[in-house]
Amino acid sequence: MLSTQTPERKFGVVVVGVSRAGSVRIRDLRNPHASSAFLNLIGFVSRRELGSIDEVPQISLEDALSSQEVEVAFICSESSSHEHYIRQFLNAGKHVLVEYPMTLSWVAAKDLWELAEQKGKVLHEEHVELLMEEFAFLKKEVVGKDLLKGSLLFTAAPLEEERFGFPAFSGISRLTWLVSLFGELSLVSATLEERKEDQYMKMTVCLETENKSPLTWIEEKAPGLKRNRRLSFHFRSGSLENMPNVGINKNIFLKDQNIFVQKLLGQFSEEELAAEKKRILHCLWLAGEIQKHCCSKQ
């Protein structure tokens, strides 16, 4: 837990990318929260010429990298640029918080983690989906139960693959849910159906738990499709069909910031950090395998 006392020092922060996630990060950093007391927002970096946002100044990437004052970078840019920014900030001796997915390849993520360890810096991948009320509900529901089979379907409007990566990477929060609930998974098959003229895409992934229970993950994207998540889990002791209304998700990015600050202050055990890293790398590895399967069939 974070202390409410005045911190002895503040870490200077720069936010890279100021669309939805970046704007929320700036808002949280400027408000008086327990973890924000340990952080000092110095400025933001954007490819657009914006001057300032809510009195927070825009600074150049070069100045953010070279400034002694900047000790932390929040990477909130599009996914395709994450790897490049993480590498630059780690090499400049800064701690990094990055929105998921950290990278669009398992090899790159492994390499960046090694770089962070060499530099003695925190590398934290945000996973706000694990801080949602729905996930907390599911975690309680599945504990100690024997899964027979399950499925998770996610629908939404299309995303540009060049900016956000292959659907297994842009949808990695769904994969993270499944791995966090049921342990490490193996890939059985994966297919991708596309109608580019209609901007339609459907990815169907068949996975298996270590106990050989089948899990199906489907991502379906098209203009006009509402953002929706449908799930079905069948256990020996009963079934869970769809999610009840479990309340509003409040301040999930702030909760993630709290976790990051606890890491900066050395409040996580080596075992906890190693387990998180193992889960993140497993999900990125699975996403890469899914992409290979789908691309080999096209």
Image: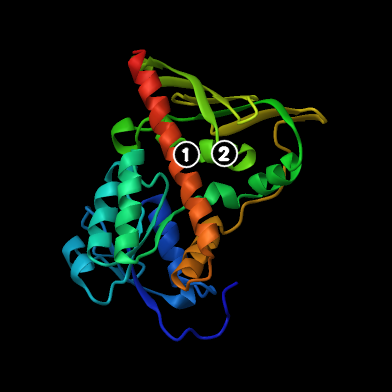
The one nearer the camera, 175 or 241, is 175
Residue 17 in sight here: no
Q: Which residue is mark 1?
A: 283
Residue 233 in sight here: yes
Name the residue: 46% across, 53% down: 126
The one nearer the camera, 270 or 38, is 270
Please state the horizontal and vertical placement of residue 222, each as a whole percent of the image.
Answer: 45, 24
Q: Which mark is residue 28?
A: none
The one nearer the camera, 147 or 61, is 147
Amino acid marked by disc 2:
Val
For marks 1 and 2, the one nearer the N-term is 2
- Do residues under tags 1 and 2 come within 8 Å of each other at their CB atoms? yes
In the drawing, does residue 244 fall left or right of residue 49? right
The picture quadrant where one finds residue 285 is top left
Q: Residue furthest right?
A: 237
Q: Residue furthest left?
A: 62
89, above or below 67, in the image: above
The one nearer the camera, 41 or 67, is 67
Q: Which residue is mark 2?
A: 179
In the drawing, does residue 201 fall left or right of residue 88? right
270, above or below 156, in the image: below
Amino acid marked by disc 1:
Cys
Name the residue: 29% across, 56% down: 115
The picture quadrant where one finds residue 62 is bottom left
Dot 2: within a 10 Å radius of its alpha carbon, few (fewer than 14), some, or many (20 or more) residues?
some
Please state the horizontal and vertical placement of residue 132, each as a whole percent of the image.
Answer: 61, 49
- Report helix, strand or loop for mark 2: helix
- Report helix, strand or loop for mark 1: helix
Please state the horizontal and vertical placement of residue 109, each as a whole percent of the image.
Answer: 35, 46
